[in-house]
Image (tube, rainbow, N blue to C red):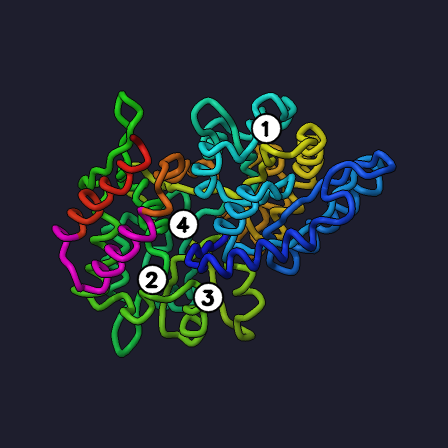
Amino acid sequence: MRRIARGARLGAALATALTLLLSGCSGDEGGTGPDGRITLRFQSLAWQDESVAVNRELVAEWNATHPDVQVEYVQGSWDSVHDQLLTSFEGGEAPDIIHDASDDLADFAYGGYLADLTDLLPDRLRSDIPPHTWETATFGEGIYGVPFLQEPRVLIANARWLAESGVRIPTPEAPWTWTEFRTLTKSLSGDGKYGVAWPLKDPVSATLNLSLSTGGRLFHRGADGKVTIRYEPGDAVVPDTVRAQVDADGSASPTTLGSGGSDTLPGFFGGRYAMVPLGFSYRQQIVQQAPEGFDWQVLPAPAGTDGLTQGVSPQTLSIAADSPHQREAAAFLDFLLQPDNMVRLALGDWMLPTGTTALADPALHTPDHDWATGTALAPHLRPAPAQSVRGYPEWKDKVATPALQEYYSGAIDAADLEHRLETDGNLVLARYQR
């Protein structure tokens, strides 16, 4: 999923919502005009130039062949999408078609704001996306979004540095273990240089998703359907590795812990870090920003007891429950997510399509920009641990983010981390499960 920040103030969210609604509400307000033509509002969160262009092209192609059902493109923003959508839902002014991420859907789905797509989607689309991927947008008995783009977390490495060091280069068939990863990052460090730079401004999703490889689950659903948090040995491997690299080994830069992924790129290009764990789509920025002659490569993330398994929160497309034209909106989704179009969307966002037909496209298996490495990881992607947990956004913002940030920086120890994630976290989740 694209990097998402939910820290927007409510005032800013209200202003954003008002701007989007005014821009999206023409005379027919996204409904049926006096000439009988239906207008659907599609709020897209595409932000890279290539991705925005592809989305707009596809909308134009639909409109050219569907004069009676027109789609109006509305530009949204990842930075404030959760609060903006909540405001528009409660005001009865939500877009018909909603672009979001699967880990942001639970409260909207359970709150009745999103349409159940179970009987709206064509069999072609239902069968083309694997069942485990549909789980990311399934809440209770309903499907509330179509997961269409996803990205594994990978290691972006300085290829020349690794080659000169003589370390074993991992592949999807023979990845590093977490123990091996810690050892070699230490061997790559020294003289003010680090084997790895962890950009953990948003530490929760990175920690939880990578922990699936080590058997970490953190969230456990009981027979009564209620979810509780248990911090078990499998959950501790990734956090303990990062903490050891920063604190004990001196192999991870302490200054990047509060940084976003883009913030680490200048130091990476400058030869300060041998590797940076990033989302697969960061390759686009690297292609655009890397100095001439800089040699980089994509490596799989380390593997644990469960192999290369890692959690993902795919980008999704949903339909508002209040939309009077749900079947027309579903028809547009079917068009937008035809295999060829899904490939275009994936290439535009430098991500992987969820559809098996699109994923087999030769354009996604080329060695250019290491597309083939990322595609080889697709079978190992599973729903993020917190995918269907109500209260996850509050737990993440108020409990997990500060606790993990303090643990990684050395401010608290492992026992404190476990206590805060479990005890404080379960108090938050309990309020959503009464």
Q: Disc 4 marks which amino acid?
A: Pro
- From the image, tell me which residue sits under label 4: 300
Give the class, few, some or many, for how many residues have Cα within 10 Å of label 3's Cα (few <14, many ≥20): few
* Any part of residue 377 in sight: no
Are discs 2 and 4 less than 8 Å apart at CB?
A: no
Q: Earlier in the sequence, mark 1 or mark 4?
A: 1
Q: Position of residue 154 (x, y in %)?
A: 42, 52
Which portion, as a residue range, is magenta? Answer: 395-416
Give the class, few, some or many, for how many residues have Cα within 10 Å of label 1's Cα (few <14, many ≥20): some
SS of the residue at dot 3?
Answer: helix
Of the pair 282 and 165, the residue shown nearer to us = 282
Give the class, few, some or many, for how many residues have Cα within 10 Å of label 2's Cα (few <14, many ≥20): many
Quarter of the view holding residue 266: bottom left
Give the class, few, some or many, for how many residues have Cα within 10 Å of label 4's Cα (few <14, many ≥20): many
Q: Disc 2 marks which amino acid?
A: Trp
- From the image, tell me which residue sits under label 1: 128
Q: Is residue 24 above or below residue 338?
A: below
**Residue 404 magenta-drawn?**
yes
Determine which of the numbered discs, if any, sits on residue 198 in the image: 2
Are discs 2 and 3 less than 8 Å apart at CB?
A: no
Q: Earlier in the sequence, mark 2 or mark 3?
A: 2
**Residue 409 magenta-drawn?**
yes
- From the image, tell me which residue sits under label 3: 262
